[in-house]
Image (spheres, rainbow, N blue to C red):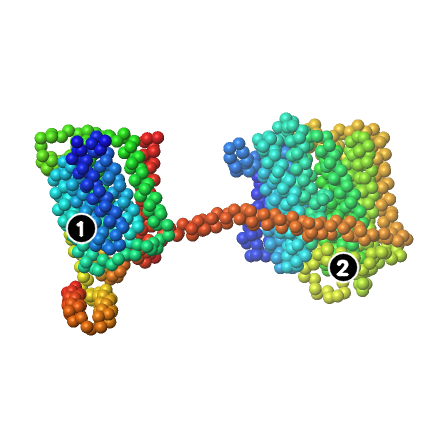
Amino acid sequence: MIAALEVTPAWYLILGALLFSIGAFGLLVRRNPLVMFMCVELMLNAVTLTFVTFSRTLQDTGGQSIVVFVLVVAAAEVVVGLAIIVALLRKRPHATADDIALLEG
Amino acid sequence: MIQVELVVFVIAGAACLAGALGVVLSENPVHAALSLVGTLFGVAVLFVAQEANFLAAVQVIVYAGAIVVLILFVLMLLGVDEMEDLTVEPLVGQRIAAAVVSLGILGLVFGAIASTGYEATGVVGEIDADVADINRLGESLFTDYLFAFEITAVLLVIAVVGAILLARRPVGDEIIDRGQDERAEVIAERMAAAEARAGGTDLDESADADDDEADDESATEEVSS
Amino acid sequence: MTDLVWLIPALPLAGFLVLVLLGRRLGEPGAGWLATAMCGGSFLATLVVYAGLLGEDEHDRSVVKTLFEWIPVGDLQVDIGFLADPLSITMALFVTGVGTLIHLYSIGYMHGDRDFPKFFVYLNLFIFSMLMLVLGSNMLVTFIGWEGVGACSYLLISFWFTNEANASAGKKAFVTNRIGDWGFLLAIFLAFSSLGTIDYAGVTAGAEGLPAVTATAIGLLLFVGAVGKSAQIPLYLWLPDAMAGPTPVSALIHAATMVTGGVFLMTRVNPILAAGYDWAPDVIAWVGVITALVAATIAVAQNDIKKVLAYSTVSQLGYMFLAVGVGAYVAAIFHMVTHAFFKALLFLGSGSVIHGMHDEQDMRRMGGLRKLMPVTAATFIVGWLAISGVPPFSGFFSKDEILLYAWGSGGVQGKLLWGIGLLTALLTAFYMSRQVFMVFFGEPRWNDPVPVAVGGGGSDAPADDLGEAATDADAVEVADHGEHGDRIEPHESPWLMTLPLVVLAVLAATAEIINLPFSGDLHFLGHWLEPVLGENEAHIDVATGTKVALAVVAIIAAVTGILVASLIYLRRRVKAVEPRVLAHAWYYDETVTRFVGGPGTKAFEAVAWFDAHVIDGAVNGVATLVRTSGRGLRTVQSGFVRSYALGISAGVVVVLGYFLTRLYI
């Protein structure tokens, strides 16, 4: 029976969905800012996987182009985000995401 | 005959999921970063399986090679590598709500996929199968999406400038790294404990411990300079 | 000529405005002369309009002059306009005429008062309001005048407001009037909703088509208003207290003009009364005649010179409502005119006495004044004879006509009404004679140490009645007469005060010529008012012999009253009977006070509680709701980024779900 199983695009989509939801859960639950970043990267990866799948099934190169852009943007985002975290943590070395609540007026 | 694609998918998929769970569940952020690398590799393999070879390469180079390294840099640099206490959740009900939300998203996407009859519906394009994917991608980027391409170049420049500005030490700012003092305390404690245990009989061990201590101290000194 | 009808109220209004701005500068007596001139000018204007109406043909004697559109809202069209027709011009004539005489009198009476100009400001405003009332072309303009005279009455009653009793009396008058006004307002609403218009022209035209229920409702609601304004039972209790005001005020407002407003209103809407049930006018007649009787009984036991006249006014107004109730509108108006003359005369005369007695109002301290105040006495006696119904003075003719129509209204009820009216006439003669004898005849008592009740053989009116009468009378007419010290030397009043008395006396003696009963041709007033009254004027079928007999009986009643009074108060042969219950006005005032203070207050408090907690509570509740919900919602803004992230994710799920379900379900 296993021999008859065929990998359809749906499988990739489902995998992407799983990755995305795991990433979302992690983002909401973790407090360490860098781990939160990593969860965001997880989600982005899920999205790129989905795009590539659709690009192949729909025979459209646009999907792959978008993946390129996603990559670029993710890189830029990581750079800037980490710069912010560096600036923050220099002053307050053990800050977590919850400590931003101290900014509340 | 078991299909190659099936085997590849199963292995790569398992790697992805294991990595994802590792990111979310690791207490140590460095372990999380490493798990992320696992996921990224898995995704790259899946790209290859989908005949997006170029993208797989780019994924490995940019994501696993650059972004994760960056994250690790910052982790080590700032000492954010301390363990997070995962047993505690300061916000009431956050975990449950998070679980509900992520399950909701999962369910909805499943539903969307199922409703199409597990087929991809949408506008079907035309691809010349003879042309390599990298050629196709290049053509698409430089003709259809040229403007977006140029904008991303600008975006990168802005990101670099912004990062330099944000992460720069303000002029005349004192270097305060309280973490260093704590670390020195911890090390001193451990030293005392080790000496108490050893009783000063094992010279090698104490010598090793001294070396370790010296390494530790020099490492912290380097960090602070 | 009739176009000048707007001038009639305009002149007093102008006087009011000028005096408001410049009154203090004009001072005494300039302000008074200006006010009198304005009122006199108004009288002349009325004469001109009257002449104009006379020149018109009988059927064209209703002229409406609209000044401007006031409320054009949907179906409601209310203009500020004047209706010059026989009824309104008759009213305007005696209002302005008597008003001018009283203005003249006031210049002398208020001499030396600190607020001399203010008095004339209010007087002119009053004349203006009264003229709006009688000349209005629709119910709303009448109502404006109605409210205006109520307000001026309040202002003038409490003219010497530094005395708390005076201020209270003013408030009492205003509040009691308000109850009547409620009825008037409801009638206006009802008239508009059923007739679509509140113009008198439209109302008279449409009244026939009204269902009897509606017509009765409107008529009786207007009667409620009239009861308040004209001091009938049960809303008469403000009028005796209103004697706290200066005497010219009592003469003008509470005798000649304002209180007649109710009778005028009922006459004006006579088509509506005719279109209602038959029992509705009977109600009016009975209320009138009972009020007349009760007031007369109270007047018998009063010791304040003005209080007697106040209750007498209530009683005579009852006669007018009796007339209206039996359909004798002409008789009602006739009596109104003659009453205006002789009642104003009596009040002004009493004012003259008070002035001469240096603000003494208790009749037990007077006596024998006819030698010292001859003009006052002579004119007062003319008024006395008129009100008592002694021919050939005018009061006899007008009162007799009312009694005749009562008798002729038919059935047992008619005879009963006549009988009660006759009894009241007897009492009227009695108490007025009592007053005259106590004040002008007999021995002077003003220098006696303690006021004792007058009358042969002592009386059972104990000393505390004096206290009650004195404070009730609010006899604090503060005028500048201190120089005579304790020993009072009564003197005659100046010509400013006696001239109006003489004029009024002449009028009271001769006013009957406007409506003599001897022949149809002499019924001037009846013919004059015919366009207004039309079919609704009652026609009685009484033989001439019966008429003469009734007249004779009335004369006998009057003479009897005078004789009995003379026996008691002049010749001191018979002991005076003045029971306390009458002196206290049947304890009506006390009952009302106790009710309002007791259950009434509880009811008011309940209403106030409702207003504070339910109505205000609803408003405040909205605010409280906003505040508490805001406080609750504020917790969402915790500052925790992860909570915000959770919110965003939840939103994503919702939006996704919405689109998916929309597409696929």
In percent of width and height, residue C180 lies at 65, 43
Q: Given the current orientation, which residue lies at the most extreme bottom position?
A: B200
Asked if one can make out residue A19 in the rendered structure from this viewpoint, the answer is: yes
Identify the residue shown where x is 85% and y is 49%: C565
Label 2 crowd (10 A; few <14 / some 14-19 / many >=20): few
Quickly name the residue at label 2.
C467
Tell me where residue C152 appears, x and y as whole percent. 62, 49
**Residue C661 at x, y percent in the picture:** 34, 33
Q: Quadrant of the N terminus of chain C?
A: top right
Judged left or right of residue C543, residue C269 is: left
Q: Quick one: quadrant of the C terminus of chain C?
A: top left
Query: What amino acid is at disc 1?
Result: Val
The image quadrant of residue C289 is: top right
The answer to whether any part of residue C299 appears in the image is: no
The residues tagged by marks 1 and 2 sit, at their Cα atoms, a distance apart of 108 Å
- Estimate how packed mark 1 is, as few (under 14), some (14 to 19) or many (20 or more) residues with alpha carbons within 10 Å: many
On the same chain: label 1 and label 2?
no
Give the mark toward the camera: 1 or 2: 1
Q: Residue at x 14, y 38 (%)?
A: B48
Depth check: give the residue in front, B21 or B197.
Answer: B197
* C361 or C377, nearer to the observer: C361
Residue B68 shows which numbered tag?
Answer: 1
Apparent side of residue C19 relative to residue B83 in the rendered image (left or right): right
Q: Is residue C487 found left or right of C70 in the rendered image?
A: right
Tell me what residue is drawn at x 12 percent, y 39 percent.
Answer: B53
Q: Nearer the viewer, residue B88 or C521?
A: B88
Amino acid identity at mark 2: Gly
* Disc marking residue C648: none
